[in-house]
Amino acid sequence: MTTTAARNHAVGQYGETLAARHLVAEGMALLDRNWRCEQGEIDLVLRDGRTVVICEVKTRSGPVGGTPHEAVTDIKVARLRRLALRWLEEHRLSHLEARVDMVCVQLPRRGAAELEHVRGIG
């Protein structure tokens, strides 16, 4: 892994950790993290009451790559919906509602990270 790739991976993992802590503090229960199958990956899976939340986390530490919002396209949302169904089936929870959320994490040069939780992105 190149130095840049390793740094980006570390930034992404840090953003996911911040997002998970934030959502748990909001009252959600963390069920899974970095769940993978041949169709893709889900960053975070949480439970919000009777709803399973599939959460995409996008972390940025500068202006390169655009805003976190711009990184989640309609194609990505459709893939997350398919992954949600697969996760629910594999965990025998297909009777529950599912929602796709996004947490945008901005890491400024100085100061605390800024998080924005966007519910129901698609």
Image (tube, rainbow, N blue to C red):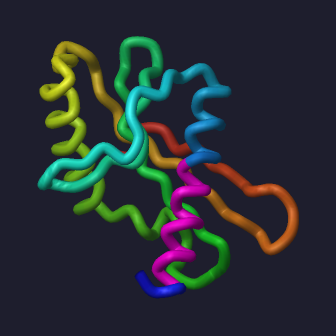
Main structural element of the magenta stretch: helix, strand or loop?
helix
Position of residue 44 relative to residue 59, above or below, is above
113 vs 29, left or right, is right
| 14 drawn magenta | yes
107 vs 1, left or right, is right
Q: Which residues are magenta?
A: 4-16
Report the front residue among 96 and 16: 16
| Residue located at (20% from left, 27% from top) | 88
Seen from this angle, which residue lies furthest front? Answer: 1
Report the front residue among 20 and 65: 20
| 17 drawn magenta | no
Position of residue 93 relative to residue 115, above or below, is above
In the rendered image, residue 100, in percent from the top left (x then y), is placed at 36, 40
Position of residue 87 relative to residue 65, above or below, is above
In the rendered image, residue 22, in percent from the top left (x then y), is placed at 65, 37
Q: In which quadrant of the rendered image does the N terminus lie?
A: bottom left
| Residue located at (25% from left, 48% from top) | 36
In the rendered image, residue 8, in percent from the top left (x then y), is placed at 52, 74
44 vs 117, left or right, is left
